[in-house]
Image (spheres, coloured by chain):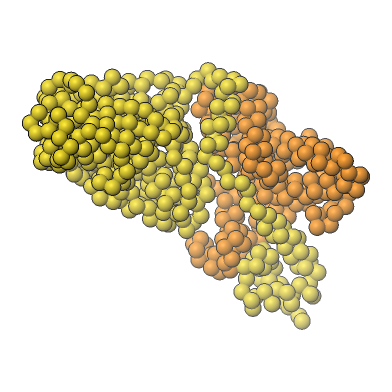
Amino acid sequence: MATTDGAPRRDEQLQRRLARGEETALGELYDQLAPMVHGLAGRILADQTAAAQLTREIFAHVWEHPEAFDPARGSLRAWLGALTHRRAVDRLRARRAAEAGFAGDDAQDGVHDEIRAVATAARVQYAVAALPQPLRETIAESYYDGRTYQETARRLGISEQAAKQRMRQGLELLATELEQERARHRGPTPADPGRADADDADSSDTERADGSARWKEGGGT
Amino acid sequence: MTITDEQHEALRSLLGAWALGAVQPREGAEVEAHLTGCPECAEHAERLREAAGWLSVEEPLDQPAALRKQVLDWCLARRPADLPVPAWGMPYAAETAKFDALLRDLGPEEWQEVAELPWHGGTEYLRPAEVLCHLAAVDGYLAVALGLPDPVPSGTGPTGTAASGTGPAAERRVPPQEAVLPSVPRVPQQAGRPWARIAERTARLTAEQAGQPPQRVRARWRRHCHRLVRSAALAPQGNTPVDFGFVTVPLRDAFVDRAFECYVHGEDVARAVAYPYDPPAPQHLRQMIDLAVRMLPLALAGQRAAHPELTGAAVGAPDGGPGRAVGARTGRRVRLVIDGPAAGEWLIPLDGPEAGPLVGEPVAVMVLDGLEFCQLAAAHRDPDRLPVGEHGDRAAIREVLRATPLLSRP
């Protein structure tokens, strides 16, 4: 698994410390990954209480079973991201199924589409959050703050060429993520509802692990 | 329209910016004209624009600061820690995490905002990254006490006061938990020698970090915080003395002091960037109040030395309690009642050990909110305008209120 040199070792150290029962390791794990876990849970479940609950469960799972993490298969972040995603989608599915329980097949179809759309949106958002900092920052400056690439370049103290390049590269990474996500569902965009049931959570987790590990590579801090 | 390879490449390089709507109208028109005749670019553009479309999905939920404690408590209830963080390290762990969460969200512009950091002798104006350098510079005293490397580069060690030419350090100790009065309580009255070393260490670290991207300064500060807490958890020796240069305190108090300063400056930064900032958890706030109360005799002594006219009955409200005039200078005590979530009661000795034994009832009772008391201790409130419930000798209460901000430092 290709990640930055220090990262796997850091993950393993943290895992060892968790296994030893170091409370500080739990705190560090939380500080490092809670924004991702809670953010992902919040996006999928769209409910503050449910997101907090899931966050609690995810961290309790790692704290109680640190050995369940296999550093050889990807980063801690990717593992937790996948775990959170899977459990959040499961929950959403259960909630929707209960809600649609009385309705017919049509409603069930709608439920599947909605869950897929929510899950895709969450993945992409998670992907945005996982973009290497320079790319994310450049995109944020222009897209969220409404600046041209020339202004963005000036503000970030980089060349216009670099700003353009970062925008392209960042979007390219997102597009790839989007493609993978759709391949997983073998189907439609949220705007183009169709039908597909590809929900092998485990295989999608593995892909996710690859993707995020790769993206962490250029991430400069 | 014919187009050269060079023009094609130039337009293609614009596609990301174009998809984000970050090009000027003229460029946008050029790109769009090109797309109609270049399927290769059109396909690429479509792909990027589609990705950009997903950016508009709404932002994730804000992460409530209280969540951290909820999650950690939940975990620890299910599997108790074999190597727990000592209770006196908890406020620091929580406050540094909270400040870090705020900093994580700062954009490039916000890192340039200047925060105001008032203390009783003036106001410091620092950018967030400089605030971090300041915090780390003082945290360095704890690091050294714990046998960790000092985050502040070279110069003289934090304990080598004499060699640095800042004059002999005032050797004072904060009363221990049992609240025995220090034998020679002195508190600096103004910005001068006692703070000089902190200012100098801050300046050195700031100079070293200048030019670094703020997020890197943040990451470095965070690593130091983690290391401090971890050392304290692995070998929890709360009595280890920590020499701040102007005062020596046991490690357990030093950690609470650092948590307090981190909270205060975290809020200073939050104010500068107009973000909300949660107060400390009640049990942490209580530890901070307790430390401030135990330090108060030093501040009172300093105030007595600097302004004898303010003490005793001089500020005199004509309540005519038993303690007016000369008799007022013998072992008076004020009962401090903190209400709010960190509720508790403390007895504050007003007059120092030379005034005689502490006997009889407190001369006054003052009631105030715990957070307000902490803000006062940080010199973030005007002692004359603070809402305080007062019973008994009001002059004595004024004395306490005016001495409390003297606990603050730059």
| Above or below for A184 versus B47 | above
Residue B376 in the image: x percent, y percent? 31, 41
Look at the image and tell me whether residue B315 can be seen: yes
For image coordinates 37% across by 28% down, the residue present is: B344
**Residue A158 relative to residue B297: left or right:** right
Q: Residue furthest top?
A: B82
The colour chain B appears in is yellow
**Residue A68 relative to residue B360: left or right:** right
For image coordinates 59% across by 38% down, the residue present is: A34
**Residue B171 relative to residue A26: left or right:** left
Residue A205 in the image: x percent, y percent? 75, 37
For image coordinates 38% across by 44% down, the residue present is: B265
* Along the line of sight, the residue nearer the viewer: B133 or A50: A50
Residue B354 in the image: x percent, y percent? 11, 24
The colour chain A appears in is orange
For image coordinates 48% across by 51% down, the residue present is: B275
Q: Residue furthest right?
A: A105
Q: Residue furthest bottom?
A: B1
Look at the image and tell me whether residue B299 can be seen: no
Query: Is the N terminus of chain A in the top left, top right, bottom left or bottom right quadrant?
Result: top right
Residue B342 in the image: x percent, y percent? 41, 31
Number of numbered discs: 0
Answer with the quarter of the image where residue B409 lies.
Answer: top left
| Above or below for B69 versus B44 | above
Answer with the quarter of the image where residue A171 lies.
Answer: bottom right
* Along the line of sight, the residue nearer the viewer: B187 or A61: B187
Q: Residue furthest left?
A: B326
